[in-house]
Amino acid sequence: MRKTVLLILSLFLVSASASAQSPASVVDKVVSALRGGKAVSASYSISSKQGSSQGTIVISGKKFRVLASDVKCWYNGTNMWSYSAATGEVNLTNPTAADLQMTNPYSAAQNFKNSYIVSKGGSGNGTYTVRFTPKKKSNVKHMLVTVSTSTWLISKAVIVENSGATTTISISNYNRNASASASTFEFDKNQVPAGTEVVDLR
């Protein structure tokens, strides 16, 4: 679940202008926004057959923080702290480049055009939909990302698996000038239950 959330939420930083006419140009804007250095925050909700979850995400360059009821993650550019309610512990790692391609929104966005065929999925009623189809065999059939044509911000993403199962993510409360200090991306023990063990896997 955590990897799916971070992969799709890498897209929420789209800040395309009204001149963006092609799906590929929208993806380029994602990478450009992620490289901008300014902190961007948003709220999200995710639902699938496994259940539902709500949370917030803050991204600044390569750094990010995700806070939700079932998972929390901090990445300061070197160290990553990942908390899972299922395991009840925090894992501290120094992720490799390969790890970051699946867990870091910055790296995920950079690799989207290499990993997916990007095409237009439709338009109308003030929205523009981009379809992402995996180039290699995957359990994901395609992803549909809906963008508001009035704000050029992503409002919804739907992952459709080959089995027919779907995961829907709704994104709201964007702030493209969020306040985020260096400590935002450092592990905060107050965000996890008291006495939670931190397992150093570096």
Image (cartoon, grey):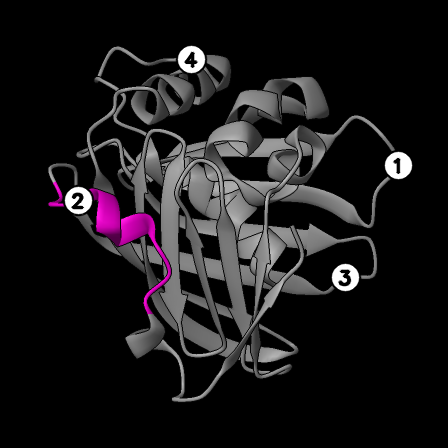
Residue that label 2 marks: 181
Cα–Cα span, label 1 and label 4 = 25 Å
The residue at which mark 3 appears reads as 164
Q: Residue 84 carries which label?
A: none
Relative horizontal placement of residue 101, taking residue 189 as reference (left or right): right
User: Camera-side residue: 96 or 101?
Assistant: 96
Task: Please state which amino acid type lies under the numbered disc 1.
Answer: Lys
- Which of 26 and 35 lies nearest the eye of the viewer? 35
Residue 181 image position (x, y, % from top left): 17, 44
Disc 1 is placed on an element classified as loop
Q: Do the residues labelled 4 and 2 touch (CB within 8 Å)?
A: no
Disc number lying in front (4 or 2): 2
Q: Which amino acid does label 2 sit on?
A: Ser
Residue type, mark 4 in image? Ser
Measure the C-alpha gap from mark 1 to mark 3.
16 Å
Q: Which of pointers 1 and 3 lies earlier in the amino acid sequence?
A: 1
User: Mark 4 — residue?
Assistant: 25
Which type of secondary structure does the marked residue at label 4 adopt? helix
Q: Residue at x 34, y 20 (%)?
A: 35
Q: Which image quadrant for residue 165? A: bottom right
Vertical side of 145 occupied by 67: above or below: below
Q: Earlier in the sequence, mark 4 or mark 3?
A: 4
Which numbered dot is residue 137?
1
Identify which residue, 118 or 197, lies in the foreground: 197
**Which residue is at the far right?**
137
**Residue 179 covered by magenta stretch:** yes
Span colored in magenta = 178-188
Q: Nearer the viewer, mark 2 or mark 3?
A: 2
Identify the residue at image location x=45%, y=39%. Answer: 10
Instruction: Mark 1: give few (<14), some (14-19) or many (20+) Cα within 10 Å.
Output: few
